[in-house]
Image (cartoon, coloured by chain):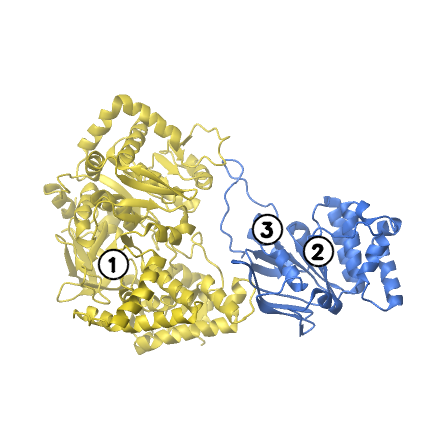
Amino acid sequence: MNSAMRQAISEPPLFQGHDTPAKVLRSRARDWAARPALRHKRRGLWQTLTWADYYAQARAFGLALRDLGVERGEVIAVLAENRPEWVIADMGAQAMGMVGNGVYPTASTDQLHHILTDSACRVLVVENQEQLDKALAVRDSCPALVRIVVLDREGLRGLSDPGVLFWNDLLATGDALAATRASEFEDAIDAGRPSDLAFLVYTSGTTGAPKGAMISNANAVFQMTKAPEYLDAVPGDKLVSFLPLCHIAERMASVFNAIALGLVVHFPENSGTVAQDLREVAPHIVFAPPRFWEKMHSQVELFLRDAISPARWVYARALASGRAGVEAQLDGRLPPAPGLSGRLLQRLAFRNIRIFLGLQNCRSALTGAAPVPPDLIRWFLSIGVELREAFGMTETSGFATATPRRGIKLGWAGLPAGGTALRIAAEGEIQIRGPNVFAGYWKNPAKTAETLTPDGWLCTGDCGEISPEGYLAIRDRIKDIIITAGGKNIAPTQIESQLKFSPYITDAVVIGEGRRYVTALVMIDLEHVARFAQDRAIPYTDFASLTRSGAVVDLIRAEVEAVNPRLARVEQIKDFRIIDQLLTAEDEELTPTMKLKRKVIAQKYATLIDGMYPA
Amino acid sequence: MLLDVQNLETWYGPIAAMKGINLSVSKGRIVAVMGANGAGKTTLLNTLAGVIDPFKGRTLFEGREVQGLDADEVARRGLVLVPEGRQVYPFLSVRENLMMGAYARADRDAVARDLSRVQGWFPRLRERDAQHAGLLSGGEQQMVAIGRAYMSAPKLLMLDEPSLGLSPILVHEIFGIIRRIRDETGTAVLVVEQNAAIALKHGDDGYIMELGRIVAADTCAALSQKADVREAYLGGAAQGLSGAQRWKRRRTWR
């Protein structure tokens, strides 16, 4: 047992007097019974579940699980896009003392098989026929799995399989049990201990098989106590749940922060309607990786390129007049009061942009999980959205540092959460200690020992520095640092993030390990580049021909050359190649969050890379 | 190159039916454009034939721009459309229908030669020479429509869904004749088809359209090897373990 866990047990964090998330949920269901908790858009209409509904369904699911023979400490998993049933299943299991888990909907059958067998999963909740097919393909080699529960019946009405149940039927069973055995559920919640596991998060694992990070009740409750520190929210504020719930950030936001702060979690109709749903819901809290905010920015830029010229004029003038204020804000000075015309311009341009993006109510805008280009923060500040950087990882149960309100320092990811400690160890590695540090890897003591020092410090694998004010800056993953043939150390992620700021570049991988100079492989943004080609009458047919078009290569070269002056000489990108295949999250080259995997890319495109280094 | 289409873009009100289409047809080739309903295939042919004016883009036919010309002028240049659903003149005889295709031609000898050619390809039309075209079967009407188009001495024959409503045997017959026309006269063919299996079998080059964009372009032989094409168009989808597969995989057309 590591000391972080020991500490959690000796003085467990309490949230409003409760030491497990399930206990907090129960008191929410009592206090806020009739208030909305979860909303889901179905066939264009928002359907609302109240806190009482949430609790009742979680109870039905939890009791039904017990009825199926699932015991405390055993794992259940959900393989679905974000939807209310996801969080209901998760909380229902946790309340019964079982361990929740999630599998990415894009997971291959091999990945699913690994996660199910590694976690000895007892019950798997799948979204629909597509996911059921994956589960059926692997169930024979998952001995612990007793049932598969399907959410959507579509296409499966004729199915009769003793190992497969439908969600509605299971919930009906659970409701019937609740009529006589509701106390079992209450007792199970009371029996929950801070040191019990709340859920598992399988890390996507760029090397080796995914590992299950164990998050304890104490970890989750500690993060709940911290939520009011970095989020400016009141009960009833809205949130849109659109990032994968298997990821620690969305899990904390949509499940635990929502319970802690009383947020109404909105689930989009599907992943294609997110932009529209954001506009409609106008959430008060938005957390998303930089890529998402970049998309918002380029959407506005490209939209205005097609706008009538007065609109473009107003936008350009308003941006220019806002810039002075932004620089002052960043220096910690009071922004100069804009004149009447400036205020009018900004109101005219930026209010509409915020409404267009659905950010008009947003009081807490946060980003993290990847380096944030400074220009992105500047742009959002000028349109009146305070986009704050945070840092966290699965192993810190979510946020470890966050930028306080009115405390943005460009390039820095904020201050550590109160009650936790940060230090820089050998090789510049960032290490963290505190109640947010996870409980280790599931059934993997060797990996756990590599990650947690005996005295409770978490080795993050990131290198960075700490400013005199206590702000943390992340440089890169230690293992990703490139050492060129000239012996120079280069942090590729920083360079890549600058490239990705271009609307035409979705992602890039910087190459240079043991090479004479630095190059890059670039993944283009199909939508924006296709539009560029069409606007300039550049002929192309399919994706590959688009990437080979001279004008597109020139376009990307210009984007690369725009970044180069901001880099040190040794970091400058001397050559690049465009990846000529359209990649999707199902491809091994991409993580479920659509990031290029450095190692796989370097292997798969070795000839393309070697072509950039003539002998 | 006979036909060179560059960045064609067409809007129906607020909806973009074609979002930048590029394709080319070389002399003597059969080029197939495939795609599901609403992909923009018919819009493409109607735009090429001058029925619709494009919002953007160019169409070069034998190196000269033809976009924006009237349909009759386009046809006179040798770009001839066989419209979807045949559209024969029901109350004219078969021969009159065929001769309508030669309406703009003055070279009587060549017209007579072409008529006997058409009757050679479609012996049924010779049999039904004097019958009202409206009384013919669907397959025979399709023959009339193709024959009529050939009578206007096309350099490029554009066919919109020739397989529509025809039996599988007739579809094969029609495509066989399309190939014969190309082999015997060197006429290039641009055919739009939902029946991808047949189009890939008989075509030389192929394009796949989805929602107003070309998503794949290659020779038909290469296209029919692509997994996504096989699954989406050639019925190669694996049956799911839970029964008939109702979900769609994301396609990348590799």
Indicate whether A385 appears above or below A181: below
Mark 1 or mark 3, which is nearer to you?
A: 3
Residue named by callout 1: A461
Residue contact at pointers 3 and 2, CB within 8 angstroms: no
Disc ID at residue A391: none
The residues bearing labels 1 and 3 have C-alpha atoms spaced at a distance of 49 Å
Q: Please give the name of the residue rendered at 21% of the width and 29% of the height, measured from the top-left corner.
A: A186
Q: Is residue A514 visible?
A: no
Q: CA distance from mark 2 to mark 1?
A: 65 Å
Q: Quadrant of residue A82?
A: top left
Q: Give the secondary structure at mark 3.
A: loop
Residue located at (89% from left, 67% from top): B109
In the rendered structure, the colour chosen for chain B is blue
User: Where, by quadrant of the figure, is residue A476 drawn?
Assistant: bottom left
* Parent chain of label 3: B
**Mark 1 belongs to which subunit?**
A
Same-subunit check for callouts 3 and 2? yes
Pointer 1: residues within 10 angstroms few (<14), some, or many (20+)?
some
Identify which amino acid the numbered label 2 is placed on.
Pro
Residue B205: image location, x then y, percent: 65, 61
Q: Which mark is residue B36?
A: 3
* Rendered-image quadrant of the C terminus of chain A: bottom left
Element type at mark 1? strand
Q: Which residue is nearer to you in this view: A476 or B144?
A: B144
Residue A232: x %, y % from top left: 20, 53
- Left/right placement of residue A538 relative to residue A432 reads right
**Can you tell which mark lies on residue B83?**
2
Specify the chain shown as yellow. A
Q: Return the disc, 3 or 2, that comes first in the chain's sequence.
A: 3
Whole-percent x, y for residue A155 in the image: 50, 36
